[in-house]
Amino acid sequence: MTERPLIGILLILLVESPHMLKFRWDFNETSFSRAWHLTTVALLLSGILILLDSGARVAMPVLLSWLPALLVAMQFVQSFGMKDSMPLNTFSFFANYHRIRNLRLGLTESVIHINFGNVYFVTTMVAATLGTWSDSWVFLPGVIVLTGWMLLSASRSRPLSLVVALTIAGGIAVAGQLGLQKLEEIFTSSGAALFQFDPNSTSTRIGKPGPIIQSADIVWRLTPLDRKLTPPLLRTASYNTYTLGNWKCSPAGEMKFKDLDTRTLADVPYSLLAPDLEESAQLLAIGPGLPRFTLRGSAAAETPLALPGDAASLRDFELDGAERNSFGTVRIFPKYSIIEGTVLWKGLQNPEIRPFPREDLELPAKDRETFQRIIRDLGLDDQPTLAAKLSILRTWFRENFTYSKNPTISSSSLVATSPSAIVQFLTTTRSGHCEYFASATALILREAGIPTRYATGYAVMELDVKRKEFIIRGTHSHAWCRVWSEENKQWLDFDTTPGSWMAGISLANSRTQRINDEVKRLRENFFLWRIKPGNRLGVTLGMAGIGLAMVVFIAKRLWKSRRHMKPTGQATGYSGVMRQTPLNAIERQAAKHLGTRPHGQPFATWLMGLGTSLPEPSTLVDAVDLHQRLRFDPNPASEDEQKRLLELAKRLEAEIRSHSPGIRS
């Protein structure tokens, strides 16, 4: 399930090999503690590396998926030890210290013992649950089969009942999984999260009263190069069809993504962002005269890349692929969880194609009267140029509207005559967040005959003077309008949100946020340093060398201290001939209920542990007495005694199978 078959096979061999090998180690409480200390170090180091590689949000699931490999030292001392359990205080430093102190002072202590194999089994199931393939149809049947196998090996009584119980549990699990998937689909389709990325549609908070809550975590870091120019806005997506507070892309055929074109200059590959460029325009899009900046941040498959509206090309990003749709949305498929590359912009071209004749001018019919009145009052139709119209509209919003992250506007689609949220924003409340300003601006300009689109992304506003880079956080998420300039044949960014909205953005003033920022920088910087070709080989060889040296050191010490096990029934140190009786044949069946016979414990003493669990203990007593007499009596056993013990052994085995006595120690 975790796509690590080689590691899984190695763990299988390690866990199951004690059934085939004839040597063990006499591990004691000190050995258990040392194994746990080694495991703790492995967990801490792995957690740090996973955190640096994956980030805080996914570090815990990734770490849990690696637990079977990280806990293998504990399973080793359990599987290859001569004890069938270990003290529970092994896993607590303070409890273990308390035990050692009591032993030193001659005090007694009640200690709970556990078999780590049960913990390891559950850990493996949890790891599989978090694996990449756990959503496949084979996962639940596999869990049911493995669980049934484990339970059946512990107790073979009433196997039919066990099968029925597992079938019912499996049915409930399947129903629960399908239900969770359905709930996830419903929640996802509701679009409740602000600026939740979808290249085809976005749900705004227009008409929904209440505060907007955004994360202050760092999303991207931008460092200007060359001419030190910095784009004020970084766009992730554009949409052109508005319906009741929601924007989407249409026509549907233009939503499809296509791979970016690639060109090479001076042996450096560039990914061109604008579609269908002529040869001269291609050279301009990758030329040395364009301003550029580096962009660094975390990314996953289909992550939207935050780019200026007039971005020209990309270079140096470690990607498996990059795609663009007709609306200029660029999504990437990174090779690693953290990426860094260079973006060239101001290439006099747009990643998005020209406006669609109908969709980019479409607006709600019931609101047109309001838009027409605003256009008349502002005299937009009387302005000769697009720049003049945009200037008037920007001034009107700046002087007559206020920014608020907690608007009170509420709209209902149930009453046809009620004013829409946009109309309320434009005529009565005149207060709202950037989604109101961007949507209202786009619709007003459409009524004036100017194609527009709604854009989402980030505002570049927080400068880290010390590091000479711009910090882009979740709180910098923004919405604005894209306006088509027929004169320049380009889409232009047009933002009417009052500049006061920037003053309300809380920077990294709290100690917690500053710590989070430093951890984020450290993780990204270390990761990018580690994956550089010049460093990758050295880091890999260094870590492999340390791990191999540790394994060799531990293996050498273990090999010297190993102890060969004698065959069943043969005591350590005795080289004479051991007599076997028919009662020895039931040891395997009895072991399923009593556990493996401890090293050095007499067979008869161990077997008597079944006495209180059998309906007729006298059968066991008679069989053990006769077994002992046949083994140790110097006179040969008679044929009648042999037959008698064989009958008792068969009867005893039948009672064990039918009554399933509980496990005893």
Image (cartoon, rainbow, N blue to C red):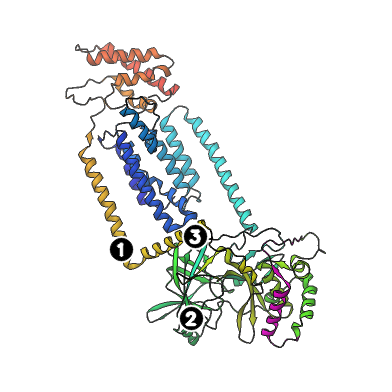
Q: Is residue 12 visible?
A: no
Q: Nearer the viewer, mark 2 or mark 1?
A: 2
- 421 falls in the magenta region: no
The one nearer the camera, 105 or 187, is 105
Give the amino acid at mark 1: Leu
Relative to 369, 334 lies left or right: left
Vertical placement of residue 32 versus 576, above or below: below
Q: Which mark is residue 514?
A: 3
Residue at 75% across / 84% down in the picture? Answer: 381
In the image, farthest residue toward the right: 417
Element carrying mark 3: helix
Relative to 50, 34 lies left or right: left
Q: Residues within 10 Å of mark 3 (few under 14, many from 20)?
A: some
Give the amino acid at mark 3: Arg
Q: Do the residues bearing badges 3 and 1 touch, measured as CB atoms within 8 Å?
A: no
Residue at 68% across / 81% down in the picture? Answer: 391
On the image, the x and y values in percent for residue 290 come to: 48, 82
Give the amino acid at mark 2: Pro
The one nearer the camera, 5 or 647, is 5
Q: Where does label 1 land, which residue?
A: 537
Residue at 35% across / 51% down in the picture? Answer: 6
Distance between the Cα atoms at labels 3 and 1? 33 Å
In the image, farthest residue toward the left: 575
Q: Quadrant of the C terminus?
A: top left
Q: Nearer the viewer, mark 3 or mark 2?
A: 3
Q: Residues within 10 Å of mark 2 (few under 14, many from 20)?
A: many
